[in-house]
Image: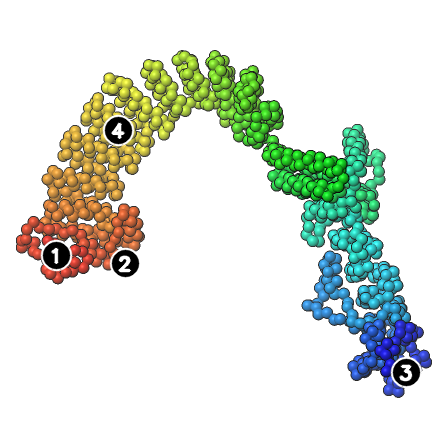
């Protein structure tokens, strides 16, 4: 039995099968090309050679016949041969390929410019050489050509794929024949993009011979771009770029460089390909320069990222590349220093040139006399100057420090933390740890936000920890004792630096806050506190703070810096161990008095603290002189205290805080005359408040200047109006009455009348009471009563009831009970409804005491119209008790009738809700829970309430007062406890 290997044809045997279509098969060269069945077709085509339909029908019939035969054919070839030969693995496929080629070539002789014929012919040949094309399902039709970034994604998904295919080595002759056929087609119809795209798709086939898929493919793409109009270039470029990506290496770089010179929108994709190439050889320097160029253009508004990235994000991508490929992208330390020096020198020369150059002009228009020529583009616009940092063709590395300062810190001041950490990471990756530490320190000393500080500090601390850990690991593995000792010494230094960094954190944070706002007084005070007992640093901090802070922009309490600095010298430093230096303290305060503070009060505080300094050291005369200097009155006293356009020193003489301290100082260590002079100056300047008036008067009273103190009160009530003058009047009148009692009664009456003349109603009650008390004690009772009567007419509504109560009490004490009736009657006329009921109860009690029962009953009836039984049960209880004690059956019935009438009057939904609310506030609960039934049947509600209320009980049983019937008593027990003495009154008897 023969072996399997003997049945497998060799490569040479397979190559011998080709070429099949080169030269083009004819009946002379290929005997089996035409069969007897094809004679009729050939005769028909010979008779009608110019009929496209005849040729098209013949070709279509031949293709259908081939498709039917190929389904019935069975191949005994091994799989390896089929994989190499693809669609041409069987003899039937090969002869059918030749027959179809013969037909197509014959037709194209007559129709060389037919796109339809060429397309069909090329598709047929591609199916035999490339294999069966995989048809992908698409959702909807093809839309307008998108942006190149999206087009690359779509085209990558839509690239043609084939099943099988002819091996590029075995079937090289057929591949070459296919290429030649495409070239002939494009010679006849060169401007049709579909044929070009079909041609270009060959180069993506995995079995395409390398000699075709590289150089020839690149030349073909270039010829397509030269041949087709620019409007169709995008469809070629998208295939060109994808082909370049598949090839990688210099081909990728060359193709993408050409395209981004026209359309920079794919630059970001290009940089990604440069950093992640298929051949494993990254080009980080070129990628970094491209990203830097994009970041600068985006910052100027000349570029918009297709991925929606901001200029800062593009710069962040550049920093990521720099961090990852630090050695390939950036300069080392020495080169960086040299580059920085060269840049600084160039900038200095440019500055000098700009300062020395004088503009030349002609007719007022500036002209350029010398200098480099300005490059312009095709539109006449000036091109930007050449920058080697963004020239991706240049092999020169980048000065990372200079670029981050120029394109980072100068533009993105709010992202300083990320920029500083990126620069430091760059140096760490290069192994330049000292330079990285220096970078971290610069960042900590320059950032302005806590967020940036935290970012830098955390990265700095992490760097320190990782460096210490690495040194400890190397120390454990070190065998050489000398090197181990040196490493251990360096490790100690690093650990010490790390500890100092942790200790400096509060100072660094404080420095950030001060840099953000140098006028923040509180942060300067915190810095002083951080220095603790270090007197030298405290003094330097105070000095720097006073030099730095702008008084007009400072936060609150700037004066405290001067005061605390002066106390620092006064107390001999923080610990008090140094010698007190009063002269330095005075100089600091003297300097503080010349500062134009935002508020006058801060300046006044400086003068007051200076005076207190002198007092603490028993220099009383000097303290007085300091306050005299501070309170010096200028000639023009009409200056507006609130005019902030004037300096604080100009407005200081109107500071009440300053004068209050001055007058307190005079009261303590001065004389009466000097104190009076200070008080008089305050009053003359019209800056006194009520407290100053009271204090001045009290001071004069203490020193037995009674009349002068009363004159001060007079000046006070003239300066102020109510309600401020009310307090002065209260004290003034009380002091006057206490001083003179009844000896100067008329003068006292004049003062009271003067006080009441402009006093508002809500404030006059105490003055009326004091006035009446004066008349009661030293004047006439009749005048006292008239004052009370005036008070009931003048006082506010909320004080009127209490005023009537006092009036009635005084009238009772002076004239007896009958004299109060007119007062009660007038009270009932003027008091509001809620107070009228209470006054009626008191009036009724008065009449009852006087034996006027009918008058009392009439008063109860008058008051009932203001009292809802559900809200004021106390009133009805008192009336009920009154009738129980003094009334009769008729009067009791009348009381119940009035009660029902009043309840019906109040029994609306709104008033019921209000009644429930008020009853709940007073702690009462209603027995009936059905509000709707209560609102609809008012009489029933009144009867139920009347039935539960205490009834009239006779002293003994008579015909007028019979005992209740058993049924009525049983009915009464349903709701309340039975009362054997209760009178039963039916509803019919009321009618």
Marks 1, 3: nearer the viewer: 3
CB atoms of marks 1 and 2 within 8 Å? no
| Image coordinates for residue 239, horizontal then vertical, percent | 79, 61
| Image coordinates for residue 621, horizontal then vertical, percent | 47, 12
Q: CA distance from mark 3 to mark 2?
A: 114 Å
Q: CA distance from mark 1 to mark 4?
A: 53 Å
- From the image, tell me which residue sits under label 4: 769
| Image quadrant in which the N terminus is located | bottom right
Using the image, tell me which numbered label, if any, was put on residue 984: 1
Q: Secondary structure at mark 4?
A: helix
Q: Secondary structure at mark 1?
A: loop
Judge from the rendering whether residue 916 lies leftward or rightward of residue 494; answer left or right: left
Q: CA distance from mark 1 to mark 2?
A: 26 Å
Q: Nearer the viewer, residue 394 or 657?
A: 394
Identified at 25% across, 34% down, the residue is 803
Q: CA distance from mark 3 to mark 4?
A: 143 Å
| Image coordinates for residue 375, horizontal then vertical, percent | 83, 43
Q: CA distance from mark 1 to mark 3?
A: 139 Å
Q: Is residue 355 above or below residue 436?
A: above
- From the image, tell me which residue sits under label 2: 930
CB atoms of marks 1 and 3 within 8 Å? no
Q: Secondary structure at mark 2?
A: loop
Identified at 30% across, 21% down, the residue is 735
């Amino acid at each position: 039995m023969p072996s399997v290997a003997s049945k497998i044809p060799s490569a040479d045997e397979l190559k011998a099968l080709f070429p099949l279509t080169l030269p083009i098969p004819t009946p002379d060269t290929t005997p089996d090309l035409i069969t007897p069945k094809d004679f009729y077709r050939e005769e028909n085509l010979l008779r009608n050679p110019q009929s496209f339909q005849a040729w098209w029908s013949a070709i279509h019939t031949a293709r259908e016949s081939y498709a039917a035969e190929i389904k019935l054919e069975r191949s005994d070839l091994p799989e390896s041969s089929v994989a190499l030969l693809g669609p041409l693995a069987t003899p039937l496929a090969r002869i059918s390929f030749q027959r179809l080629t013969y037909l197509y070539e014959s037709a194209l002789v007559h129709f060389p410019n037919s796109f339809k014929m060429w397309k069909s012919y090329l598709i047929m040949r591609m199916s035999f050489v490339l294999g069966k094309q995989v048809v992908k399902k698409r959702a909807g039709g093809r839309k307008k050509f998108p942006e190149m970034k999206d087009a690359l994604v779509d085209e990558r998904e839509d690239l043609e794929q084939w099943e099988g295919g002819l091996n590029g080595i075995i079937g090289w002759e057929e591949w070459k024949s296919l290429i030649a056929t495409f070239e002939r087609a494009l010679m006849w119809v060169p401007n049709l993009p579909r044929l070009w795209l079909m041609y270009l798709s060959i180069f993506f086939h995995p079995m395409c011979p390398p000699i075709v898929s590289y150089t020839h493919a690149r030349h073909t793409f270039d010829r397509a771009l030269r041949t087709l109009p620019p409007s169709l270039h995008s469809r070629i470029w998208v295939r060109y770029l994808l082909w370049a990506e598949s090839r990688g290496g210099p081909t990728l770089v060359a193709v993408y460089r050409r395209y981004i010179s026209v359309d920079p929108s794919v630059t970001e994709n290009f940089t990604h390909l440069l950093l992640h190439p298929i051949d494993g050889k990254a080009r980080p320097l070129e990628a970094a320069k491209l990203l830097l160029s994009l970041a600068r253009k985006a910052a100027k508004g000349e570029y918009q990222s297709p991925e929606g990235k901001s200029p800062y994000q593009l710069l962040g991508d550049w920093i990521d590349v720099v961090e990852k490929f630090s050695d390939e992208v950036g300069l080392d330390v020495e080169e960086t220093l040299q580059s920085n020096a060269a840049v600084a020198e160039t900038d200095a020369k440019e500055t000098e040139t700009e300062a020395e150059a004088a503009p030349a002009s002609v007719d007022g228009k500036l002209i350029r006399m010398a200098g480099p020529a300005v490059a312009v583009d095709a539109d006449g616009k000036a091109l930007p100057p050449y920058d080697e940092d963004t020239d991706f063709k240049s092999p020169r590395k980048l000065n990372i420090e200079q670029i981050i300062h120029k394109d980072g810190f100068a533009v993105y001041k709010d992202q300083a933390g990320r920029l500083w950490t990126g620069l430091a990471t760059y140096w760490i990756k290069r192994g330049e740890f000292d330079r990285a530490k220096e970078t971290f320190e610069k960042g900590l000393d320059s950032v302005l936000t806590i967020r940036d500080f935290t970012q830098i500090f955390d990265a700095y601390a992490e760097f320190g920890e990782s460096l210490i850990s690495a040194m400890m690991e190397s120390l454990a593995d070190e065998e050489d004792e000398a090197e181990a000792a040196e490493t251990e010494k360096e490790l100690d230094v690093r650990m010490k630096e790390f500890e100092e960094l942790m200790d400096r954190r509060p100072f660094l944070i404080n420095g950030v806050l001060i840099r953000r706002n140098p006028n923040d007084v509180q942060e300067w005070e915190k810095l002083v506190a951080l220095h603790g007992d270090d007197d030298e640093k405290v003094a330097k901090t105070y000095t720097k703070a006073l030099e730095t802070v702008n008084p007009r922009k400072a936060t609150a309490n700037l004066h405290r810096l001067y005061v605390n600095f002066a106390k620092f010298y006064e107390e001999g430093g923080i610990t008090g161990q140094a010698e007190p230096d009063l002269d330095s303290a005075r100089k600091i305060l003297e300097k503080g008095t010349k500062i134009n503070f935002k508020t006058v009060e801060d300046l006044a505080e400086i003068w007051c603290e200076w005076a207190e300094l002198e007092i603490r050291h028993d220099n009383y005369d000097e303290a007085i002189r300091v306050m005299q200097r501070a309170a010096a009155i200028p000639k023009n006293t009409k200056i507006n205290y609130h005019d902030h356009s004037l300096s604080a020193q100009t407005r200081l003489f109107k500071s009440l805080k300053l004068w209050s301290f001055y007058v307190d100082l005079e009261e303590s260590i001065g004389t009466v005359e000097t104190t009076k002079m200070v008080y008089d100056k305050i009053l003359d300047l019209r800056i006194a408040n009520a407290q100053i008036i009271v204090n001045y008067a009290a001071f004069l009273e203490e020193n037995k200047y009674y009349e002068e103190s009363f004159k001060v009160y007079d000046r006070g009530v003239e300066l102020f109006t109510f309600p401020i003058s009310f307090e002065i009047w209260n004290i003034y009148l009380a002091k006057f009455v206490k001083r003179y009692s009844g000896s100067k009664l008329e003068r006292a009456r004049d003062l009271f009348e003067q006080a009441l003349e402009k006093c508002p109603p809500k404030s006059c009650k105490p003055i009326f009471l004091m006035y009446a008390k004066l008349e009661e004690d030293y004047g006439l009772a009749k005048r006292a009563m008239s004052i009370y009567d005036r008070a009931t007419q003048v006082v506010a509504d909320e004080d009127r009831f209490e005023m009537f109560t006092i009036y009635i009490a005084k009238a009772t004490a002076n004239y007896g009970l009958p004299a109060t009736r007119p007062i009660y009657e007038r009270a009932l006329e003027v008091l509001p409804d809620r107070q009228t009921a209470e006054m009626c109860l008191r009036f009724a009690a008065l009449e009852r005491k006087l034996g006027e029962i009918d008058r009392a009953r009439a008063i109860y009836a008058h008051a009932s119209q203001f009292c809802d039984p559900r809200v004021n049960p106390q009133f009805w209880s008192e009336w009920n008790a009154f009738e129980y004690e003094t009334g009769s059956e008729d009067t009791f019935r009348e009381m119940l009738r009035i009660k029902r009438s009043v309840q019906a009057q109040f029994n609306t939904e709104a008033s019921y809700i209000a009644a429930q609310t008020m009853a709940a506030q007073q702690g009462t609960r209603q027995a009936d829970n059905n509000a709707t039934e209560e609102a609809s049947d008012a009489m029933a509600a009144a009867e139920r309430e009347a039935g539960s209320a205490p009834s009239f009980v006779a002293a003994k049983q008579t015909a007028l007062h019979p005992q209740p019937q058993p049924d009525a008593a049983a009915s009464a027990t349903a709701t309340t406890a039975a009362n054997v003495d209760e009178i039963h009154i039916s509803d019919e008897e009321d009618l």
